[in-house]
Image (tube, helix red, strand yellow):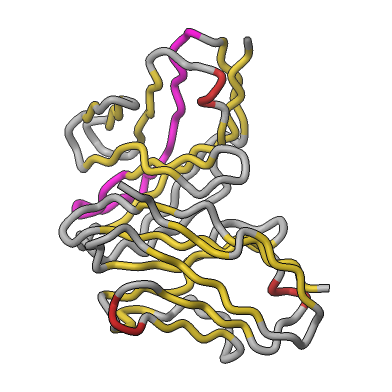
């Protein structure tokens, strides 16, 4: 699986959009970009994933650059409950063999 | 619908003792995974079941760890004998076939003294 690079920490004001970057310059053509988060000591929570098109769901949007070497997770209206560690994971998806490699992630703090 | 449930939520044992962690996946999910985070480290994959079969156990640290999933429903992870470095949080996750989303449980915290 391709390596990802994320800033260790970020702050965002409550109600504003939180934009979390991820670099994955060695991504290969069949690798997907996944985002998970871990709120405090809870289990990781799936957010979104994509291959090359931008994706949006009820939680977030995922913007992948045209060359696919980087992506941005966008939380459109951050709330205090979005304070968490966010993990960007790149891997080939076998749809049923989800061996995820978690890095150190970005610790996002939402400021009231 | 119930999520992934894990038991116990916290276990404190002495070095050399045995502990068994249990995971109940979401009903109907064929795929079951074990991950763990030891102190100060990243979350690491341990193994993957498809129904009752071990699909990938490349992350199991050593033969003190034994995972089972009899009948393809719940799974157990036994640590015997436990060592100090086994302390951490053990997460279970499940997924349906042909989806890319893992559902994680709240984890079982293991403390070995």
Image side of residue B91 versus residue B53, left or right: right
Q: Kindly indicate the quadrant of the structure image that contains residue A92.
A: bottom left
Image side of residue A88 versus residue A50, left or right: right
Q: Kindly indicate the quadrant of the structure image that contains residue A93.
A: bottom left
- Expressed as whole percent of the image width and height from the top left, the position of residue B37 reads 61, 60
Residue at the spot 67% in from the left edge and 61% down from the top edge: B10
Q: Which residues are magenta?
A: A15-33
- Expressed as whole percent of the image width and height from the top left, the position of residue B87 reads 71, 68
Does residue A29 belong to the magenta stretch?
A: yes
Residue at the spot 38% in from the left edge and 51% down from the top edge: B3
Residue at the spot 37% in from the left edge and 28% down from the top edge: A72
Q: As rendered, which of B75 and B99 lies closer to the eye?
A: B75
Q: Please, is residue A90 above or below residue A37 in the view?
A: below
Residue at the spot 47% in from the left edge and 47% down from the top edge: A44
Q: As rendered, which of A26 and B52 lies closer to the eye?
A: B52
Q: Kindly indicate the quadrant of the structure image that contains residue B42.
A: bottom right
Image side of residue B86 versus residue A90, left or right: right
- Expressed as whole percent of the image width and height from the top left, the position of residue A102 reads 49, 54
User: Which residue appears farthest toward the bottom when viewing the image?
Assistant: B63
* The C terminus of chain A - image quarter: top right
């Amino acid at each position: 699986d391709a390596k990802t690079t994320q800033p260790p920490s970020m702050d965002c004001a409550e109600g504003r959009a939180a934009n979390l970057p991820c670099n994955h310059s060695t991504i290969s053509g069949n690798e997907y970009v996944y985002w998970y988060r871990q709120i405090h000591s809870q289990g990781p929570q799936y957010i979104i994933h994509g291959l090359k098109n931008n994706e949006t769901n009820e939680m977030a949007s995922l913007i992948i650059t045209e060359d696919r070497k980087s992506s941005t997770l966008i939380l459109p209206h951050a709330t205090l409950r979005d304070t968490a560690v966010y993990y960007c994971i790149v891997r080939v998806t076998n749809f049923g063999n989800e061996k995820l490699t978690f890095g150190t992630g970005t610790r996002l703090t939402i400021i009231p | 619908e119930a999520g992934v449930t894990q038991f116990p939520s916290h276990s404190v044992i002495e070095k050399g003792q045995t502990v068994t962690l249990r995971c109940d996946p979401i009903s109907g999910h064929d795929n079951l995974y074990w991950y763990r985070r030891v102190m100060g480290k990243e979350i690491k994959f341990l193994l993957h079941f498809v129904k009752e079969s071990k699909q990938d156990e490349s992350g199991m640290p050593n033969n003190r760890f034994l995972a089972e999933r009899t009948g393809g429903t719940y799974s157990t992870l036994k640590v015997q004998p436990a060592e100090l470095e086994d302390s951490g949080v053990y997460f279970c996750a499940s997924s349906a076939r042909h989806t890319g989303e893992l559902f994680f449980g709240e984890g079982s915290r293991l403390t070995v003294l």
